[in-house]
Amino acid sequence: MFRLPISVPRSTCRAISAATVVAAVAMGAAACSGGATAQDTAVGTGSSFVAGSYSTTVFKPGARPAAPQVTGTMLSGARFDLAADRGAVVVLNFWGSWCTPCREEAPSLGQLARHFSGTDIRFVGIDIRDDAAGAAAFMRTFRISYPSVNDPNDAIALDFNGTVPPAGIPTTLVIDRSGRIAARIVGPASYDGLRTLIAQVSAEQAHRPAPGRARAPGSASWAGCGGGGGS
């Protein structure tokens, strides 16, 4: 798993030379392979489950940090604004096509996105330090149909530094309908573990209307998470 330099200010991060970024990605790809995976969840405990260097943390209602304001450009060229999805449960997955565990979790993420299709569960990927061709190839290979936001300089990852930062790649956040972070998985997400988290968070507020935004029953939602390019 590649660990992000989350403590580095954004201005400093953007000043890193292209050569340094390439070297970091190369080392990250090598470091990504192997290790234990976060296959289980600590649902309802408000604690962390740790397996090797990976972990799952669940935040109880009333003690959840607010997600930051996040905007960006999707790989498709469309604009993304996390605030526009207030009232939906958002699964936000940080990934890169150069990261081996991202490939490991991609089939599960794609299956989960299809499983929750037609609900108000939205999947969105944050593509870290990647290129469009590699990302597109990865998404074709693993049948990833949800949108991903391009984050070549870790800008979006750094936006979470003051709340619940993505400690490495891949990292998956589950954000509740109030825009607060309900859970974080550091490392590859399993199908059963992530599905359980999503179902729990969805059930908590299932009957609460989306503020300022109506969704027709059965309307299709965006789906998206991990994935990467270059496969």
Image: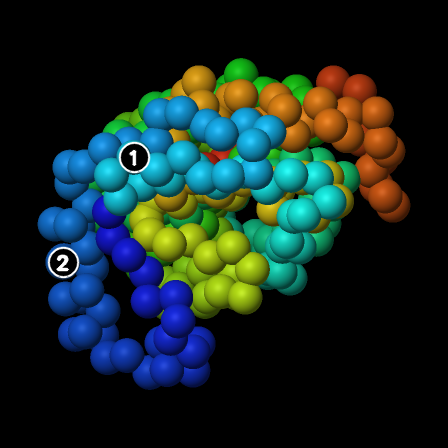
Q: Is residue 194 left or right of residue 121?
A: left
Q: Residue at x 16, y 74 (%)?
A: 19
Query: Residue 80, how many percent across, how many down?
Result: 60, 53
Q: Which amino acid, by three-letter code, is at mark 1?
A: Ala
Residue contact at pointers 1 and 2, CB within 8 angstroms: no
Q: How many residues crowd mark 1 within 10 Å: few (<14), some (14–19), many (20+)?
A: some
Q: Name the residue tied to disc 2.
A: 27
Is residue 153 visible in the rendered image? The answer is yes
Q: Which amino acid, by three-letter code, is at mark 2?
A: Met
Query: Residue 229, how many percent across, how many down?
Result: 28, 43
Q: Relative to 136, is 8 above or below?
A: below
Q: Name the mark on residue 97.
A: none
Relative to the observer, which residue lies in front, 67 or 87? 67
SS at mark 1 in the image: strand
Q: Name the residue tied to disc 1.
A: 51
Q: Is residue 196 left or right of residue 16?
A: right
Q: Residue at x 82, y 38 (%)?
A: 210
Quarter that holds the C terminus: top left
Is residue 72 visible in the rendered image? The answer is no
Relative to the observer, which residue lies in front, 139 or 109? 109
